[in-house]
Amino acid sequence: MLPNTDLLDASPRSRRRRRNLIAIAVAAVLAITGTVVALTVPGSSRSGTMIGTCNFVGTGTQCPGANLTNADLSFADLTGANLSRATLTGANLQGADLTGANLHGADLTNAHLDGAFLVGTILHGATLTGASLTNAYLSGAYKGSIGTPISLPAGWALVGPVLQPI
């Protein structure tokens, strides 16, 4: 005897099988159309996430020249990242770890770097006009940045093109 196809099997196993088939079909459609879907939880790793024109693969991300305008990179681990010449205008980098990152020539106009870790970060030629660096962690001196940030960490000053402790 053939099963009655008019009635759907309501067993948990059958429901799970239907959900899996739907998920596979959706994944196939997204793969065929080239759509990128990124689901992240605030404060979680962004490894493997596409943001703007950059694929974040974790420590050492390579995205020179990427367009990250208004990107939310808050609390991201960008240790050793190459974001040289990247456009980070209005980006939220609050609490981000940019230790040893290359931001040479990057546009950080109006970026939010409050509480960001910028130890050993290359900022030469970076535009900091209107950027907020309140409570950012800095060390040494940063030579050759362009523009005037809207706020600096306590004990730091911009002397000509040099951001330095006072």
Image (spheres, rainbow, N blue to C red):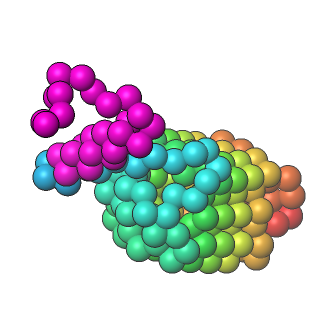
Residue 77: where, in percent of width, then height?
Answer: 61, 64
Q: State whether residue 132 appears in this view.
A: yes
Camera-side residue of 112 and 160: 112
Question: Is 9 covered by the magenta stretch?
Answer: yes
- In the rendered image, the quadrant that contains the C terminus is bottom right
Camera-side residue of 124 and 88: 88
Residue 51: where, in percent of width, then height?
Answer: 39, 52
Residue at image coords 70%, 48%: 114
Question: Is 163 covered by the magenta stretch?
Answer: no
Position of 60 relative to 92 (above/below): below
Q: State whether residue 142 appears in this view.
A: no
Residue 144: where, in percent of width, then height?
Answer: 56, 70
- Could you say which quadrant of the image residue 3 lies in? top left
Position of 140 relative to 131 (above/below): below
- In the rendered image, the quadrant that contains the N terminus is top left
Residue at image coords 54%, 51%: 73
Position of 50 relative to 72 (above/below): below
Residue 103: where, in percent of width, then height?
Answer: 50, 68
Q: Which residues are magenta?
A: 1-29
Task: Determine the main secondary structure of the stretch shown in magenta.
Answer: helix
Residue at image coords 43%, 63%: 48
Camera-side residue of 133 and 116: 116
Q: Is residue 35 left or right of residue 163?
A: left
Q: Is residue 19 left or right of residue 111?
A: left
